[in-house]
Image (cartoon, rainbow, N blue to C red):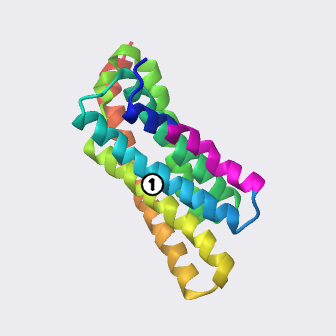
Amino acid sequence: MTWNLPNLLTVLRLLAAPGVAVMFLYFHRPWADWFALTLFISAAITDWFDGYLARAWKQTTKLGAMLDPIADKAMVVIALMVIVGYSSMSPWLVLPATVILFREVFVSGLREYLGDTAGTLKVTQLAKWKTTAQMVAIAVLFAQGVFEHYFGADTPGAVLLGHAGLWLLWIAAALTLVTGYDYLRKSTPYLKD
């Protein structure tokens, strides 16, 4: 295994994913919301930096290529679990979160099944936009939780953040469906017996 700064950032992002949930175990709200938001945004920023640095410094490794999508998925899945768990279970939140979670598990299973031929499922530009949309939506939804504790759930700012977060999550879910279908289409020739 090759350890370099890009791989270290990826590992830190991977460790930050469960840290988001742990914030709600050890801190009361709104501190838990603040810490989770800060940790999530910091980890999301490293997602861009680790890839950029690995390419710029020619330090791409198999370890990094394996851990990067796992860290992304762990961040999104755990953060959505926390947000849905602390929500009113509105279908407007649960449905896009379910679509995102299902796709992440499905594509991971597809890659596992394809084994050596999983290289046919390279990350596309649209999949990168999907991940960005997911992370921005989740950050906005965490920010809504912070805002609600200081100003109230019915204030215009909290309502605006809530609506913006949901719209962004629905956009992320739509991109999730499109990229999931694209991966399934690309893998179809390898699924035939």
Residue 181 within the segment the image draws in magenta: no
Q: Residue at x 48, y 49 (%)?
A: 43
- Magenta-tinted stretch: 12-26
User: Residue at 31% across / 23% down in the picture?
Assistant: 119
Is 182 in front, or is 165? 165
Quadrant housing residue 65: top left
Q: Quarter of the image containing the C terminus?
A: top left
Is residue 95 in view from this perspective? yes
Provide the residue designation for mark 1: 134
- Packing grade of label 1 (10 A; few <14, some 14-19, many >=20) is many
Q: From where the camera sits, is residue 104 visible?
A: no
Give coordinates of residue 92: x percent, y percent.
Answer: 56, 65
**Residue 30 position within the rendered picture, expressed as x and y whole percent measured from the top left:** 69, 69
Query: From what the image shows, is residue 101 above or below residue 149?
Result: above
Q: Does residue 108 appear left or right of residue 89 in this picture?
A: left
Q: Is residue 96 left or right of residue 33?
A: left
Residue displayed at 54% across by 40% down: 74
In the image, is residue 98 above or below residue 190?
below
| Residue 19 at x, y percent in the picture | 63, 46
Query: Is 23 a magenta residue?
Result: yes
User: Which residue sits at x=70%, y=56%?
Assistant: 85
Instruction: Determine whether, in the image, residue 33 is placed left or right of residue 26.
Output: left
Q: Quadrant of the N terminus?
A: top left
Q: Amino acid at mark 1?
A: Gln
